[in-house]
């Protein structure tokens, strides 16, 4: 050993030896740092770090050897074989690569000593090859015995180094194995050098500065390589671990500066529904629905939705903090997903305001809505609804059946009311309907009738033993009370009366309304039987050519003679029939009766029949028209159906489709009462009407009212433009006849030419001819 020290001290340049030592130490530290990284990483990255560590080891050991050799005093003109020199480096790197690949955390002492043997072999192999690469001065021989002893010691030291690395904890895992590696490398080198017999006389040296130049090169390159890998492993550890930490949180994190997003963690990207690349460098404002999100100051938090999110009800809470990022102040915005919290809050709110069985609003929600409606001051209607026989059904069929009925009633009520209205279940079998924003009291009367009719239609007690009826108590605001308490009380008074009266009907708190409603109900009831009791008949009013007074056809008008009430005007009973749903049967009767009679008339006379808007929504109407024409052998070209504009207000497309079908049969369609409704040109454009009838209110006023005259003139002009004949209705005087003729109305109708007659036209015409 003392010989060795003498050898190193005497024959070597100590500064260069120190350089070699420094590189060796840095390399050793780097190798074990990288190995540690490799052991912590996922498989893909582990291979990278193992390879990098092997290259560092190869380069480190080789450059230690190379620089130490240059430090040899008599090597001032060293020359090398380049291929063998490169091979020596590869041997070292290859041996370390194999050793590192075999190294296992669970391997124990056996694997550590195997790896130690391979690595030692690599160092010795590198050394011998490196020595063989020296061209000048020539290496004559190497005494192999000290090298073998040194290799055995090196093996022990490296095995211990690997074992310490595999078993160790903390920084000791790095420093102790690194020390083993440094000792082995240096020791092996100098033992081998001292064992070499060198002949300074052989060969010739070329060039003088090779050594210095090489020295700087090798030292520089090795140091860069070794230090670079060492730094990379530390940096990677720092960065990936930091990002891993940021990604591990359940909060989304956005680091922002000058309203730009500088960094985003995985959770933030997932919440925004995009990749990291799409977030970086964008503006904060474009990701959130609330504009304030961009200007959030530290400590502040905000609830907002994410712009364009596909998640229903997505809600996030943003909290801002200030940090130092990349050397300057930045804001971290933490995103907390409140979607579930928001849903839960809404679910709780829903539970608090809704009835769990039917899903309708509960009593509390109903009281709130009633108070709000009263506060708003806008007229509204309210119905208290109570189910008849509910307790009996509950007792007889059990609570399951009772619940099923309540749910059914809830669904029927929901269907019956308008979109703005509200239905609530306020107790066992008690419901309330709030009809918001009524135009007139008639709206409420109509809705009450509709609700009662809907329940009656769905609950057929003749077939379903669990079917039940209901009673309604109706009030309107402000007529029947100006505060919630009075309204509730009066509604229950009306409800009690409805129940006493015999069940299944609506009772109004207001006496006049109640009388009207009863009146209507009885009318409805009587009208249902009018056809079979033979109380209906048709009268015909002539349609004439304005210029000559010649009759060109007749309009059929319905009359109802009530046994007690006498003649009831169609203006009164047609709307009742429409509301009660009897218009379908009545309309069919009118059409059949009119066609049967008109078939007896001279063939040049046309027949006009009025069709209700309700009939126009029945898809069976075209088929009915066709059947009636067939049954009576009536020419479709003689039939004209009169419809009003209201027919095209609801279900416009359905109504137009039905009209087209009827027209395809050859039947003509006239627009009745033009000028009273919406008088929309689009109606005339969307459907090819065959005739326009100007309402009689304009004709009767035209001689004294300029506005009425202009309307008659405008409609007549419109007819001319569209090439449609225009009929003036309600012509009662010769003056009116002249005026409508002057305006260009080719046809006219009115008392001047004939009242709707009880006399059958067939007979009248026959009389005229006779
Ligand atoms: P409308 O279709 O406009 O029928 C014309 C109405 O004007 C008829 O009233 C007729 O008697 C009346 N009228 C005709 N000429 C004159 C006149 O010179 N002066 C005055 N003051 N009135 C005249 P009516 O028969 O009471 O019918 C009223 C409405 O009832 C009809 O208006 C029509 O909309 C409807 N209507 C009548 N019959 C039927 C029917 O069979 N089915 C349907 N759906 N509605 C019908
Ligand atoms: Ca008519
Ligand atoms: Ca009319």
Image (cartoon, rainbow, N blue to C red):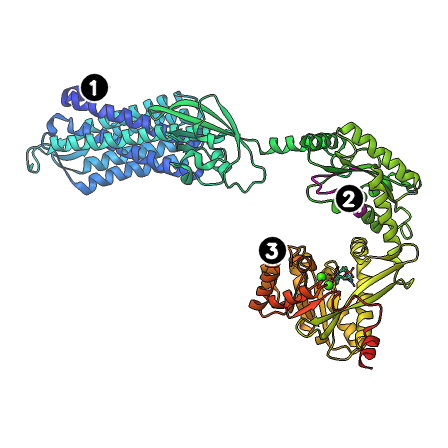
- Residue drawn 70% across the image and 73% down it: 549
Distance (Cα) linking label 3 and label 1: 132 Å
Distance (Cα) linking label 2 and label 1: 107 Å
* Residue 182 % position (x, y): 29, 24
* Residue 235 % position (x, y): 35, 29
Residue 226, picture quadrant:
top left
Q: Along the polypeptide, which appears first: circle 3 or circle 2?
A: 2
What span is colored magenta in the figure? 432-450
- Side (left or right) of 29 relative to 315: left
Pointer 3 and pointer 2: residues touching (CB < 8 Å)?
Answer: no
Q: Along the polypeptide, which appears first: circle 2 or circle 1?
A: 1
- Residue annotated with mark 3: 706
Whether disc 2's CB lies below 8 Å from ligand 1 is answered no
Depth check, front residue: 89 or 26: 26
Q: Along the polypeptide, which appears first: circle 3 or circle 1?
A: 1
For the residue carrying disc 3, how many other residues have a C-alpha within 10 Å: few (<14), some (14-19), or many (20+)?
Answer: few
Q: Is residue 126 visible?
A: yes
- Residue drawn 81% across the image and 55% down it: 573
């Amino acid at each position: 050993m003392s010989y060795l020290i003498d050898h190193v001290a005497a024959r070597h340049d100590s500064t260069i030896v120190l350089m070699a030592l420094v590189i060796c130490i840095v390399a050793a530290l780097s190798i074990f740092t990288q190995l540690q990284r490799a052991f912590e990483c996922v498989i893909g990255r582990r291979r990278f770090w193992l390879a990098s560590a092997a290259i560092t080891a190869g380069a480190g050991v080789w450059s230690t050897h190379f620089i130490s050799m240059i430090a040899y005093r008599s090597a001032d003109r060293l020359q090398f074989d380049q291929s063998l020199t490169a091979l020596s480096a590869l041997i070292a790197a290859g041996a370390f690569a194999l050793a590192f690949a075999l190294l296992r955390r669970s391997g124990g002492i056996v694997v550590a000593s195997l790896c130690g043997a391979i690595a030692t072999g690599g160092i010795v192999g590198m050394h011998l090859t490196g020595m063989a690469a020296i061209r000048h001065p020539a290496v004559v021989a190497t005494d192999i015995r000290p090298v073998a002893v040194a290799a055995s010691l090196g093996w022990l030291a490296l095995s211990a180094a690997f074992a310490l690395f595999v078993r160790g904890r903390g920084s000791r895992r790095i420093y102790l194995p690194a020390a083993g590696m440094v000792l082995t490398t240096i020791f092996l080198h100098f033992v081998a050098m001292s064992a070499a017999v060198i002949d300074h006389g052989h060969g010739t040296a070329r060039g003088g500065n090779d050594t210095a130049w090489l020295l700087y090169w090798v030292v520089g390159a090795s140091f860069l390589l070794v230090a670079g890998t060492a730094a990379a492993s530390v940096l990677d550890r720092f960065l990936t671990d930091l990002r891993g930490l940021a990604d591990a949180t359940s909060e989304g994190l956005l680091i922002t500066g000058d309203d730009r997003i500088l960094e985003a963690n995985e959770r933030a990207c997932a919440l925004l529904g995009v990749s990291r690349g799409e977030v970086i460098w964008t503006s904060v404002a474009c990701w959130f629905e609330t504009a304030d999100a961009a200007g959030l100051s530290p400590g502040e938090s905000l609830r907002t939705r994410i712009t364009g999110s596909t998640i229903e009800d997505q809600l996030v809470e943003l909290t801002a903090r200030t940090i130092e990022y990349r050397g300057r102040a930045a804001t971290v915005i933490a995103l907390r997903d409140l979607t579930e919290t928001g849903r839960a809050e809404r679910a709780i709110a829903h539970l608090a305001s809704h009835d769990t069985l039917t899903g309708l609003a509960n009593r509390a929600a109903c009281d709130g809505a009633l108070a709000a409606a009263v506060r708003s001051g806008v007229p509204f209607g309210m119905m208290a609804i109570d189910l008849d026989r509910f307790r009996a059904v509950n007792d007889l069929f059990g609570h399951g059946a009772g619940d099923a009925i309540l749910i059914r009633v809830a669904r029927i009520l929901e269907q019956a009311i308008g979109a703005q209205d509200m239905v609530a279940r306020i107790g066992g079998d008690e419901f309330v309907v709030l009809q918001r924003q009524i135009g007139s009291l008639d709206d409420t009367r109509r809705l009450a009738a509709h609700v009662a009719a809907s329940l009656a239609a769905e609950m057929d007690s003749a077939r379903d033993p669990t079917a039940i009826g209901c009673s309604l108590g109706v009030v309107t605001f402000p007529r029947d009370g100006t505060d919630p308490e009075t309204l509730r009380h009066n509604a229950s008074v009306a409800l009690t009366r409805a129940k006493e009266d015999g069940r299944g009907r609506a009772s109004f708190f207001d006496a006049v309304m109640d009388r009207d409603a009863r009146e209507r109900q009885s009318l409805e009831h009587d009208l249902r039987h009018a056809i079979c009791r033979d109380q209906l008949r048709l009268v015909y009013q002539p349609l004439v050519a304005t210029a000559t007074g010649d009759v060109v056809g007749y309009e059929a008008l319905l009359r109802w003679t009530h046994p007690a009430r006498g003649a009831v005007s169609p203006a009164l009973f047609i709307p009742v029939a429409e509301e009660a749903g009897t218009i379908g049967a009545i309309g069919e009767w009118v059409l059949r009766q009119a066609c049967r009679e008109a078939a007896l008339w001279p063939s040049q006379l046309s027949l006009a029949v009025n069709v209700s808007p309700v009939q126009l929504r029945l898809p069976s109407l075209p088929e009915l028209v066709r059947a009636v024409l067939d049954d009576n052998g009536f020419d479709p070209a003689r039939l004209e159906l009169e419809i009003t504009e209201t027919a095209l207000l609801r279900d416009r497309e359905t109504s137009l489709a039905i009209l087209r079908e009827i027209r395809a049969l050859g039947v003509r369609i006239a627009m009745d009462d033009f000028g009273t409704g919406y008088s929309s040109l689009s109606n005339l454009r969307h459907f090819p009407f065959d005739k326009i009838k100007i309402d009689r209110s304009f004709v009767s006023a035209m001689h004294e009212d300029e506005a009425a005259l202009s309307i008659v003139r405008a409609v007549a002009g419109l007819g001319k433009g569209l090439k449609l004949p225009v009929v003036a209705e309600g012509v009662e005087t010769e003056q009116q006849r002249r005026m409508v003729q002057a305006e260009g109305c080719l046809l006219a109708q009115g008392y001047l030419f004939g009242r709707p007659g009880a006399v059958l036209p067939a007979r009248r015409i026959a009389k005229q001819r006779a």
